[in-house]
Image (cartoon, rainbow, N blue to C red):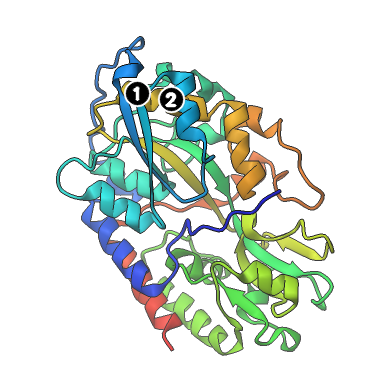
Amino acid sequence: MSRTRFTRRLPAAAAAAGLALAVAACGGGSSSSSADQAPAAADQLKPNADLSQQSLQITVWDGYTPKELPQKAMEKLKIKNVQIQLHDTNEVAMTKLTAPGDSGIDVAFVSGQYAQALNEQGLLEPIHHELIPNLANLYPEATQLSYDKGNKYSVPYTWGTTGICYRSDLVKSEPKSWNDLLKPPAWADKKVTMLATERWLALPALKSLGYSINTDKDEELEKAKELLMAQKPHLLRYDDTTFGDRLVSGEAVMAEAWDGWCPTTDPKGNIKFAVPKEGSDLWVDTMVIMKSSKNKEAAHALINYILSPEIHSWAAENINYKVPNKAAMEQVKIAKGSLLGTTPAELLNGEAAIDLGQASTKYTRLQQDVTAS
């Protein structure tokens, strides 16, 4: 199983500050504000439209879809032309999609809370379910995601959670709580890494304190900051991309990690993953169709094609992230130790991150304060 390295999250403080402003600028709000937003009216689409007269521009993370997807889509669906643009982070995608005028993008891959923000600004075309019959391949749980129940404006592509990735042969007791990271024992001093991305940096502290990962309360964020500042002298480093390598080498013994990047299939079999008892998150990456697209029938056809088992299973097999597609997951050969066997019910125990609008800047400030030298 190959492992593609890419940055699906915002990697550092400077970029994080830009993301918070970009999301706020596009009008994203909390879950309560989304109820106040009138949904964008769906365009009248033609089920039998001539796709050979339509072309698609897609923006997606590098390595997140098969390289041959554009050619396959043109051959299979008879779409005139399919072009891929790459974005490194959600921030870069949001900058493209919220710029004045037509972005030229038809289909975008963004994380769930960013899809929510785009929808609240009226920038997304509602999903026409009749044009995506392969939605039937999704797990029932994938239709009940808190930021978009019923998949009204987004279609989930991958999903997972965050936890503690650790060397079972190097820890004196297996971690079961976020406090094992936040207050590491002496034998783990300076052998622990944490994610630097702002919402995920805050997650362990918020959960250990019994708070929501979506809190915007100043007093709760301040208590989380105090925990993180006290932890800082005992860390090896903040690390969003190489923590798995550090665990393999033994430089680190525990790491806050996204499940798909915890190398539990390492041949030595000594790397494990645990979701702490206080709970964690449910992250989802989605596919959305821009309201400005002039090729909406082709966009729906592409998403339907991606949801076919032979295409969607590629993501699980090549980037080690679970896909919310029952038919696709049934085709995946799950290696010993792999986390791909985590069930949808287990994933839905996690709290979904939502767009916080202007309150996102509070997490930006917390992240900057904590990670500053």
Q: Secondary structure at mark 2?
A: helix
Find disc 1 in the rendering and name its residue. Answer: 80
Left or right of 120 in this view: 58: right
Left or right of 309 in this view: 134: left
Q: In the rendered image, which quarter is residue 183 located in?
A: bottom right
- Amino acid type at circle 1 is Lys
Is residue 345 visible to us here?
Answer: yes
Residue 189 picture location, percent across and down = 68, 87
Residue 230 picture location, percent across and down = 54, 87
Q: Is residue 354 above or below residue 228?
A: above
Neighbor class of circle 1 (other Cα within 10 Å; few <14, some 14-19, many 20+) is some
Q: Is residue 225 above or below residue 154?
A: below
Neighbor class of circle 2 (other Cα within 10 Å; few <14, some 14-19, many 20+) is some
Residue 87 picture location, percent across and down = 38, 53
Disc ID at residue 182: none
Q: Are marks 1 and 2 in contact (CB under 8 Å)?
A: yes
Find disc 2 in the rendering and name its residue. Answer: 74
Q: In the rendered image, which quarter is residue 148 located in?
A: top left
Residue at image location 41% in from the left, 85% down from the top? 372
Counting the numbered discs, the total is: 2
Q: Secondary structure at mark 1?
A: loop
- Amino acid type at circle 2 is Met
Q: Residue furthest left?
A: 101
Q: Observer-nearest residue: 236 or 174?
A: 236
Q: Observer-nearest residue: 274 or 91?
A: 91
Residue at image location 36% in from the left, 12% down from the top? 47
Q: Is residue 137 above or below residue 364?
A: above
Residue at image location 27% in from the left, 43% down from the top? 120
Q: Observer-nearest residue: 133 or 357?
A: 133
Q: Is residue 304 above or below residue 228?
A: above
